[in-house]
Image (cartoon, rainbow, N blue to C red):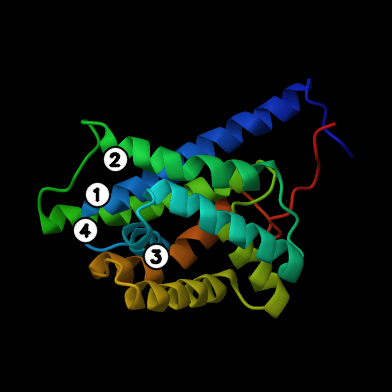
Amino acid sequence: MSLRLTSWPFWGQIFRLQVGLFLYGFALALMLEAQIGLDPWSALHQALSSRSGLSFGRISQGIGLLLIVFSRLVLGVRPGLATICNMLTVGPWIDLMREVSWFPTAPTYALGIVQFVGGILVLGLATAVYIGARLGAGPRDGLVMGLSRKIDRSLRMTRNSVEITVLIVAALLGGSIGLGTVLFAGLIGPTMQVGLKIFSVSHDPSPDRSPA
């Protein structure tokens, strides 16, 4: 069943998608500015950014493209509009928010912990919001959800396994590792799973319809 570009349901999905992606970028920026260490993917992006001279957002986009290709060819995850929008917009959203004067930067380590955990909670909800638009999942979430189905393991276990693998690579490349890294690896899987349950979102990240 196709969904026409002129239909209100389609634009409702687009609105939900954009809200979810904005919150996703906002959550990652919160964690970056908490300054207590980075989540594994951000640590990898930071390390590659430092080595290549490209911006954080550009590296995020490049990695996203590689994951889209891998997930489609190996895991059978069909990319959707959300997949492409995630790859194109989340990195720039992070770069933009970190540059504005009003964006919070934790002044103390204790407040950094609070800000980081808040970012994780927002990220889990944001993931469910944009995936619930049924226009596809982002490159990293699509990888995790597709792998979870492929190996028949829980989303929590699969997400944590992927994050730990990325963390090891990031550490070897000199990424910023700290308490935030540990918090993210332990909390993001359960938080994402709860978010998906709250919004009644399937573990299949493929889009169930396409605009015509």
Q: Residue at x 66, y 41 (%)?
A: 133
Disc 1: which residue: 33
Q: Nearer the viewer, residue 112 or 46?
A: 46
Disc 2: which residue: 98
| Quadrant in the picture for residue 130 | top right
Element assignment for label 2: helix
Element assignment for label 4: helix
Residue at the limit of the structure toward the right, as seen here: 1
User: In the rendering, at what x and y percent does residue 32 appear?
Assistant: 29, 52
User: In the rendering, at what x and y percent does residue 164 appear?
Assistant: 43, 77
- Binning the other alpha carbons within 10 Å of mark 3 as few (below 14), some (14 to 19) or many (20 upward) gives many
Q: Is residue 76 visible?
A: yes
Q: CA distance from mark 1 to mark 4?
A: 11 Å
- Binning the other alpha carbons within 10 Å of mark 4 as few (below 14), some (14 to 19) or many (20 upward) gives many
Earlier residue among tags 1 and 4? 1
Q: CA distance from mark 2 to mark 1?
A: 8 Å
Earlier residue among tags 3 and 2? 3
Left or right? Give the position of 117 relative to 110. Answer: right
Q: Is residue 124 visible?
A: no
Disc 3: which residue: 44
The three-letter amino acid code for the residue at tag 2 is: Arg
* Residue contact between numbered discs 2 and 1, judged by CB atoms under 8 Å: yes
Disc 4: which residue: 113
Earlier residue among tags 1 and 3? 1
| Quadrant in the picture for residue 5 | top right
Q: Is residue 167 above or below residue 200?
A: below
